[in-house]
Amino acid sequence: MQPVIVWLRQDFRLSDNPALTCAARSGRPVVPLYLLDDETPGGRQAGGASRWWLHKSLEHLSAEFSKHRVKLILRRGAAKPVIRALAREIDAVGVYWNRCYEPYALRGDAGIVRMLNIERIEAKSFNASLLFEPHAVKNKSGRPFKVFTPFWRNIRAREVSAPLRAPCKLHGFSQHIDSDDLGDWKLLPTKPDWAGGLRKTWKPGEAGGKKRLTSFLRAINSYTKGRDRLDEDGTSRLSPHLHFGEVSARQIWHAVKVHHHTAAADKFLSELAWREFCHHLLFNNPAMPRDPLDKRFSHFPWSRSTKALTAWTKGQTGVPMVDAGMRQLWTTGWMHNRVRMIAASFLIKHLAIRWQKGEEWFWDTLIDADLANNSANWQWVAGCGADAAPFFRIFNPVLQGKKFDPEGGYVRKWVPEIAKLPDKYLHNPWEAPAEVLKKADVILGETYPEPLVDLAKARDHALAAFRALPRSA
Ligand code: FAD
């Protein structure tokens, strides 16, 4: 029987995978394909941490398919010619996939549909990653939402379709098909191997994602309080599993809705809705990863200091809360949302470095790097995005530290060289008297950096630059 190709991208799961289910229901042999596309123009290559996750997740997915005697095919190259070549090679009757909503993915898909039509091969695509198609959520005037709260009200009142079970049966294709060797793609870092912290922290794959969801659901009722404590594991840490589609938003939504009717559960779903909102924004503003939505910010007098940018990336700014976050990011590939906001605000407002530089660093180092979530959130912090924090809301990393890491567990873990400082000076070592520093074995400028900037002066400078912006672009 002629087979159906299921082209997988950010949907590395067997359950709630509409493209796979549709192929399985056809009764035809299924040929799952992952293709590493670093070639299609306009695309954005995955960063280093994402590549590590990709390798691990593909290993897992391949093992899951093997249980059904189905081989996951790996190919490399620009999507359109690779799919055409494989479809011809195995005489496929259809190519099914789940949609990605990044602007380059949408453009690419349109070309692939045209090519398949010419080849007389059936093309079918589905929504598997979002609760609702981005074009289907509109305000009363039929326009895309620009503000989160009405967006959230709108989608919360809708019915989210039920997730699909994994197909009971999949038929493999009997003919041999060449596949790349995953190791040859060199997605894992070797010289140096910086992924030790990632290996220790994460279990990529559908089973790892399910396990994380189950254990989070046991604690979901503490989410409202726990989500802001940096020294506790109060959030779900589902973001990389969501990005790679190892767990779907629909599965999470239903798992929460069925058993949990608390304010904390509702709060958690509203965070999931932020993910939805970010994708909605990117869909309606394809240049969002590059250009400020508020065009006035193109005139901001950004600093070009590479020294300050490097210190920020390395967690050596001399501001403990920022450094703790940046080191957590480097070691584990993940950073708590509050610290992402603090570190981003410090880069943009205290160091006056353009948000795009921070977005690029996060893209390379986050295991949950996601074009929509990353760019929308950077714009939100910078004050130039949709429904953004106003520019004059400048996070004070000292006060934030004292409030959300009151016992200092988070900073002491990631910035051990100042761990012996008393709580009073842990977030602001430059204010500690000489004898306190000495007792804690801290020599500013030697064992730990002096702060890169005077926080109060840098804040005033940022506000003055903001006030000088033109009123309209
Ligand atoms: P939880 O609190 O458990 O939330 C559950 C899920 O809701 C998350 O997994 C995520 O999918 C979604 N979510 C929560 N907060 C947000 C948010 N503010 N925006 C969008 N979705 C959200 N998230 C990414 O997934 N990828 C990114 O590249 C990314 N870059 C960011 C950059 C900056 C500057 C900031 C401030 C935030 C960024 N976020 C990004 C959003 C957020 O920090 C992470 O989604 C969250 O920390 C993930 O941890 P969690 O799964 O434990 O979250």
Image: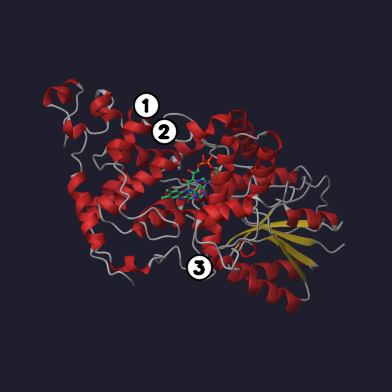
**Does the residue tagged 3 have its C-beta within 8 Å of any atom of ligand 1?**
no
Disc 2 marks a residue whose amino acid type is Leu
**Circle 1 sits on which residue?**
409
Left or right: 274, with 62 as reference point:
left
SS for callout 2: loop
How crowded pointer 1 is (Cα within 10 Å; few <14, some 14-19, many 20+) is rated as: some
**Quadrant including the C terminus:** bottom left
**Does the residue tagged 2 have its C-beta within 8 Å of any atom of ligand 1?**
no
What colour-coding does the image apply? secondary structure
Is residue 453 visible in the rendered structure shown here?
A: no
Is 457 above or below relative to 85? above
Q: Are marks 1 and 2 in contact (CB under 8 Å)?
A: yes
Q: Which residue is drawn at 19% across and 24% down?
A: 441
N-term mark: 1 or 3:
3
SS for callout 1: helix
**Circle 3 sits on which residue?**
286
- Residue 371 on image: x %, y %: 50, 58
Taking depth in this image into account, of 146 and 98 the one nearest to the observer is 146
Is 245 above or below relative to 36? above
Left or right: 33, with 25 as reference point:
left
Residue 230 is tagged as 2
Q: Which residue is drawn at 58% across and 65% down?
A: 105
N-term mark: 1 or 2:
2
Is residue 380 visible in the rendered structure shown here?
A: yes
SS for callout 3: loop
Q: Residue furthest toward the top?
A: 439
How crowded pointer 2 is (Cα within 10 Å; few <14, some 14-19, many 20+) is rated as: many
Taking depth in this image into account, of 29 and 340 the one nearest to the observer is 340
